[in-house]
Amino acid sequence: MKIMPGYTISFQTMSKIKQVALIIAFSFSALLFLQATSFAQVTDQITKSLNQYGQSTIQEKIFIHTDKSTYIPGEVLWFKAYIVNAGNHTPLDLSRVAYIDVLDGKQNAVMQAKIAVSKGLGNGSLYIPVSLTNGNYKLRAYTSWMKNFNADYYFEKSITIVNPLKTPDVAAKATLGYDVQFFPEGGNLVNGIAGKVAFKLSNENGAVNNFNGTIINQRNDTVARFRPLKFGIGSFIFTPLEGDTYKAIIKTDKGAPVIKELPVANNAGFVMTLNDNGGPALDVTVKIKNVNAGAVYLLAHTRQSVSIAESASVNDGTAHFNIDKAKLGEGISHITIFDDAKHPVCERLYFKRPKKQVILETTANQTQYAQRKKVNVSISANDMAGKPLAANLSMSVYRIDSLQQVDAGDIFSYMWLRADLRGNIDSAAYYMNNNNNEANTALDNLMLSQGWRRFMWSNVLSNKTPAFTFLPEHDGHLITGKVTNTITGTPAKDVVTYLSVPGKRVQLFAANSDTTGKIIFNTAQLFGPGEIVAQTNTERDSTYRIDILSPFSEQYSAYTEPKFQLLAAMRKSIEEHNLAVQVQNTYSGAKIRNFYEPRVDSSGFYATPFKTYLLDNYTRFTTMEEVLREYVREVWVNKSQKRYHIKVLNEKGFLDGDPLVLLDDVPVFNIDKVMAIDPLKIRKLEDVPYRYYWGPSVHEGILSFTTYKGDLGGVEMDPHAVVLDYEGLQLQREFYSPAYDTDATGKSRLPDFRTTLYWAPDINTVPEQKSEVSFYTSDIAGKYIGIIQGITPSGDVASQYFSFDVR
């Protein structure tokens, strides 16, 4: 073969060249394949770690629907709790108890409650005491399981309490303190690389909207200008330069300018930029400076469910990703960039608008009513095609005026937006109810100025099973405590402790202390206020102290409520509300204080006793020893070394050791005290003549004595026992709503000054039929609004409003 003049190549040489070319091509393809395989391994590892973390750290969200948001002392605050799986918003049956706190401006709890929850739903009430001062308070809600995570993700809501009996605080004429924050997109500023910076300005009254800002360098050169778009939040493009320093000068309509240093720019690092042009894809660009990186990795997840995991090569310091928005989950997605070493280097949030899956329809049968007239409200829940759905709902109807405005907190905007962000979100409903350029830009600014921090990536990538301090209360309320050795002052390990609840029901719980001295009593159906008694077997363990711990959270979010200001325009409304509350408490106070009897199992923890002795059915003796010897065939009483002992007898013979003896549910370990009881004070005796295992304790039979008065028959408690006032799960209060269905009731002279006409925490729609609720107007004229909120079994949430006038 002739190639060039004077040159020839043999067929053998040509064959070798082809072989070399094939080898080079194969090697290059193999290199690309190995590189792609390596990239895939990294993304797979990160995805696997996040999935494992999500499976071991199930998250809860809780939403509280209150009947309204402004209260006068003497009123009742009504509320409904919805607890869902944070991942898919379906009602979650993990926790059976929810905790409610009302905090003042110093994070002190002024009201607290524990409410029973079933299948993610529960409700309760709080009586507003007259001791509270005027102000905005924080109502928050959480579960025991949620205490393992950041308090920023507890439910929080602002409520206002106006106390006409308290002198309003005089507003101080001090200069407002401003808080300005800057948030570089992705988290970093790098010299020489343009990036977007979000900002937020607020003061003690909330977001500040009227201001202008300027970015200047150390030479006082203006390099950027900015102003807020919505709720004190906005963004600007900025390119820092090496050697320069920057600060922002913000001018508001009040006071001196606010000066704030910008975050320091680095000479090396990663800068992330996300662009959404409204099309089907997001463009994510990562620019890299002075970092040796052959590739970067992108992971997008929505509430810990991975939707996208991709890699991109770095060319000339730039990597590009094109994200299909259809693959992202609805709501907030967390987009994170990782380097070659799987270290997270950039992250930001993106919001994909959720599609409404359920529509609530609520209409009153009239737009105007006279006083004491019946209001009929039809309710239906339908999907987007109009098909009826089953849903669990709560509804409130109350008067609105200059004091009580429409409560803007709705379950849809909370579940999809506010619950996944830290701190207060001003007007969350604005972002959800508006879908235009301004609202979309404002929404993206909000994403830039927040962070979804339910976990740290170091915890995720370590692949370690997280350790949790607080257990979920899946069966009932957990009462925790600590056992300490009073001699050494150290935690006591492996000490069996007992907790009893004196009362009509036999309630006894046992726990064994762990290596830290911690004890957990898993109570069941513990309702209402009362006493609890915690003790060890002092006949055997007399050197221990028991401390019962508060179940309420001691973590607090950084957000504080804005200061409440009484305005002159509110005066008339305050007077009317105050009069209405006083009239209602005077004439209907007894009905307002009605409670439902809890549905509980009245039998003792040992279920059905072997035999029950009602002592009035027998000849009365003067000593307990005679009673036991003459009537109770299952026991044998003897006295050894000047101490009484009781042996339990069954068909197999005597059991070893003394039985567990209960007096009004309280264990009595000194049998001499039992023998000293006056038998005339005992109503009944139940016995279990078998070895009984109860938690970590083992008992050689059970004898349970019940007195007529439930006062232990005069027996003194052991001095080592801890006796505390303790409130269990809240008793359900009845909402008072009179019916004027006859002429006599309609003309009754008993005043009806209700401003909250109706509260129903548990309305269930049935697809096969139309739901309807009814109530009556009161003697108070005005404009009334009804708010209904709820959830379907599949986790779709919705709310709706209706209104009418009373004249």
Image (spheres, rainbow, N blue to C red):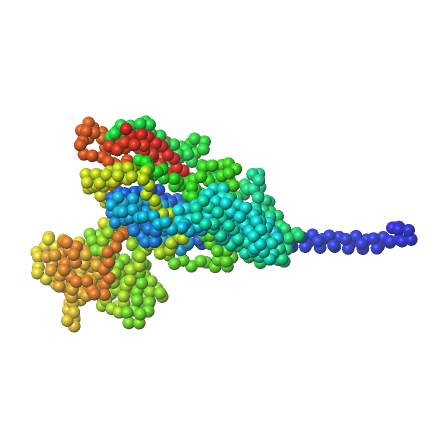
Q: Nearer the viewer, residue 102 or 574?
A: 574
Depicted 801 relative to depicted 165: above or below:
above
Place residue 73 in its image quadrant. top left
Q: Nearer the viewer, residue 306 or 760?
A: 760
Q: Nearer the viewer, residue 444 or 41?
A: 444
Percent of width and height locating residue 1: 88, 50
The residue drawn where x is 33% and y is 30% is 804
Q: Is residue 190 visible?
A: no
The residue drawn where x is 27% and y is 43% is 72
Depicted 293 relative to depicted 537: above or below:
above
The residue drawn where x is 27% and y is 57% is 509
Q: Is residue 384 visible?
A: yes
Q: Nearer the viewer, residue 156 or 606?
A: 156
Percent of width and height locating residue 27: 71, 55
Percent of width and height locating residue 612: 17, 54
Quadrant in which the C terminus appears: top left
The residue drawn where x is 31% and y is 40% is 568
Percent of width and height locating residue 76: 27, 43
Question: Position of 534 compared to 192: left or right?
Answer: left
Q: How many marks?
A: 0
Question: Position of 670 compared to 321: left or right?
Answer: left
